[in-house]
Amino acid sequence: MIKKKDLAYFGGKKSITFRQPHWKWPPFSKEKLSSVKSYYLNGEKKNLRGYPKIVEIFENNFKKYLKRKYALSTNSGTSALQAAFFAIGSKEGDEIIAPALTFHATATPIFSTSATPVIADCSFDTGNIDPLSIKKVITKKTKAIVITHLCGHPCDMDEIVKIAKRHKLFLIEDCSHAHGSTYKGKKVGSFGDIGCFSLDNNKLLAAGEGGVLVTNNKKFFERALLISDFALRLKKEIKTTKNFFYSDTGLGFKHRIHPVSAAIANSELKKINFYIKKRHKMLNYFSEKLKKIPGLHPPVTKKNCHRGAFYGYRPFVNKEELNNVKISKLIDLLRAEGMEVRLSGNKPLHQLPLFSKKEFGPKFLGKNLKFYKNYKTGDFPESEKFYNNTLSLITFTFESKKLINQYLNAFKKVCYYLAENKL
């Protein structure tokens, strides 16, 4: 029986003895180092100014991986999303539906096109955008839907694609969490009109920083390229006369990926399946053990879905099984045991100032969005329920099983105590 004095929070011995940080990503590899050296030693001799050869090589390999016709690398996933919204012709008066549960950068680039973000609720089981909620917020002004495959779990693509087609809406996939994730055997990023990926250092395909936009639509690719680059690359790749007119200047932005990031990403792309397999092996072990502990439930993965990158491990907390402990107190108890843990991800969009009131969002940005909706807590109950009842843990991949077992011991100690005692 666990006693109060056994908990580290109350002076007991810590369960986790490893020094923090416990998760070290990205992993080191000789191949990655070699790719960077190769660029510096040989790259410039073969480069087209403004469009290094290594960038072209990476884009060709990435579009083959996704089975898309076009790929455009950028300096971040956020820039890829901004290019996507511009590519579909998003403008003032348009509405774009976005999920309440996502990193804010899924939706903030919408403001750059003077369109209005409209939030939809998410499902409590996966945290992904709920197709029923999408249907409820569609209006005559709706231009597009942007979705996030949260924590690598694919959205309900059959239903979402059906909705987009029925209402003639553009569909943009934010795949920043979902490199290699599949829905019914097909990779995410290849369902919508445009797919966007992040390459920042926390992502499975980590390149320091960067992003990629993929599409099968030549028009979208050319418009995305116009808003992201200028000069020689545009002259080489833009074929449409009205777009080529801007080839000298582009449209005012320079969002190119750094060639070193492209070199790293190209090297890491070769190992992506190995990383995914290794990560799933460790997280499956963790999940099997975790589901035996009272008050905790591993993340759900639905039939016909594969999480791929599995970015972010977020177990559910059943507070009723733990004597209705506040989740903030549970986190305090676990941190005292030496665990790296926090409340799940980011606050739902409607609880962030930029999206909650006109004076904090559009007005501050100098936008007069006539149809902007003020949101408040309670508007999207399922998303709030997910956020308030899940923990965010490190994404075990190459860490030792000894560390994982210490995390499990910390959970056992704290949860078994809470199941029997009220704080």
Image (cartoon, helix red, strand yellow):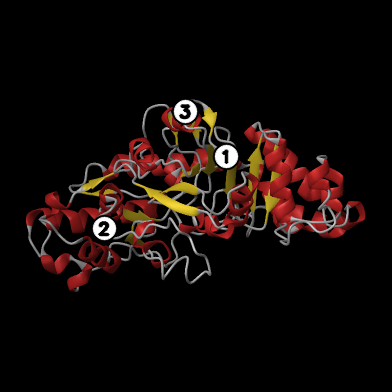
Residue at the far left: name it.
421
Relative depth, front residue between 353 and 332: 353
Element marked by disc 3: helix
Residue shown at the point (53%, 36%) measured from the top left: 188
Q: CA distance from mark 3 to mark 2?
A: 50 Å
Looking at the rendered structure, the kind of residue marked 1 is Phe
* Pointer 2 local density, CA inside 10 Å: few below 14, some 14–19, many at least 20: many
Looking at the rendered structure, the kind of residue marked 2 is Ala
Element marked by disc 2: helix
Which mark sits nearer the N-terminus, 3 or 1?
A: 3
Q: Disc 3 designates what residue?
A: 166
Q: Disc 2 designates what residue?
A: 410
Q: CA distance from mark 3 to mark 1?
A: 39 Å
Image-based side of 84 in relation to 48, left or right: left
Quadrant in the picture for residue 360: bottom left
Looking at the rendered structure, the kind of residue marked 3 is Arg
**Mark 3 or mark 2, which is nearer to you?**
3
Residue shown at the point (70%, 59%) measured from the top left: 255
Q: Quadrant of the N terminus?
A: bottom left
Element marked by disc 1: helix
In the drawing, what numbered circle is on residue 274? 1
Which mark sits nearer the N-terminus, 3 or 2?
A: 3
> Does the image show residue 162?
yes
